[in-house]
Amino acid sequence: MAARFIRLGNSLKLYTNKTSLVKHASSASAVKQKLVNLPPTQLTQLDNGMRVASEDSGLPTATVGIWIDSGSRYETDKNNGVAHFLEHMAFKGTSKRSQTDLELEVENMGAHLNAYTSREQTVFYAKCLSADVPKAVEILADIIQNSKLGEQEIERERGVILREMQEVETNLQEVVFDHLHATAFQGTALGRTILGPTQNIKSITRSDLAEFVSTHYKSPRLVLAGAGGISHGELVKLAEKHFPSAKSSGESTEIPILPNCRFTGSEIRVRDDSMPLAHIAVAVESCGWANPDSIPLMVANTIIGAWDRSQVCLFLFCCQIYWKFHGLAF
């Protein structure tokens, strides 16, 4: 087998040397043409500090979303888990719409409404037809600014989140990454979990949720982003209409200062001989997501790719096809 791989490597090198000079110019031209065809990203900052970004590709569908700097990194030990709790509460009714009305309205549009919480951000987004973008933006603005946070809904979602935590605990890949953050960023906000500890979920109140919203859901921390069949000018007007200025809404523009999260090189091993598999995660300090080098890093990550045992057969199958196509012996 080793000899076959050596022969394959030599054949690839010979094939590359023969074709690279011929294909280089055409490849560069193709890449340049693709870059020209990409829709440009347009960015506008409103008077209230909110930013609006869009890419208009002329499609009949679109995706719009609100990105908020309010993930678990902005929490404390006391309210850890509140950002994720708010994500659950957003779809439980507002002062304008009941939960049933909201679900029917989205369903009748043929749209998809969803949300997720990370350590850095909370995101609410909708996928819809381009003609329904104004309605989708209005719905997103409504659930972010006017959620009722009803006591009955809070108690119901408390149970849902506790069951979700039990499911996550059985997913060892999720568990190992929580351990990794707790170790690599020990003693800092990034070391906390997104879901929060069980005791917090059991004790979070409506006032905790409302306080987190009033503290962190501020215009300068919001980004309205859209892609697909979207007019940037229309999206800016929708943002100005549905997200009032801080002065008119009485909103404080003061933004809490985020403490630095130090990276600590360390190691923790949890051994369980009753398990057939081992889950291992290694973290290396690198640039932050706001650093310009984060984009090349993500490209490198995509090039390196991922691998698991199930991909061995696929790899050998692809090798057979390549070798037969080029007349090589297998």
Image (cartoon, helix red, strand yellow):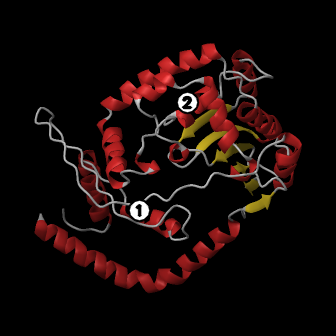
Numbered label attached to residue 301: 1
Residue kind at label 2, given as amino acid type: Phe
Can you tell which mark lies on residue 172?
Answer: none
Provide residue 201's location: percent of width, then percent of height: 47, 26
User: Which badge, 1 or 2, comes first in the chain's sequence?
Assistant: 2
Amino acid, disc 1: Asn
Please indicate, yes or no, whether residue 126 appears anywhere in the rendered image: no
The answer to whether residue 151 is visible is yes
Q: Quadrant of the N terminus?
A: bottom left
Q: Residue at x 31, y 56 (%)?
A: 318
Q: Position of residue 119 (x, y in %)?
A: 50, 46
| Foreground residue among 319 and 97 | 97
What residue do we see at 29% from left, 56% from top? 282
Residue 283 place in picture, x, y as percent: 33, 58
Q: Is residue 64 above or below residue 330?
A: above
Q: Mark 2: which secondary structure?
A: helix
Quick one: label 2, few (<14), some, or many (20+) residues within 10 Å?
many
| Image mark for residue 85 | 2
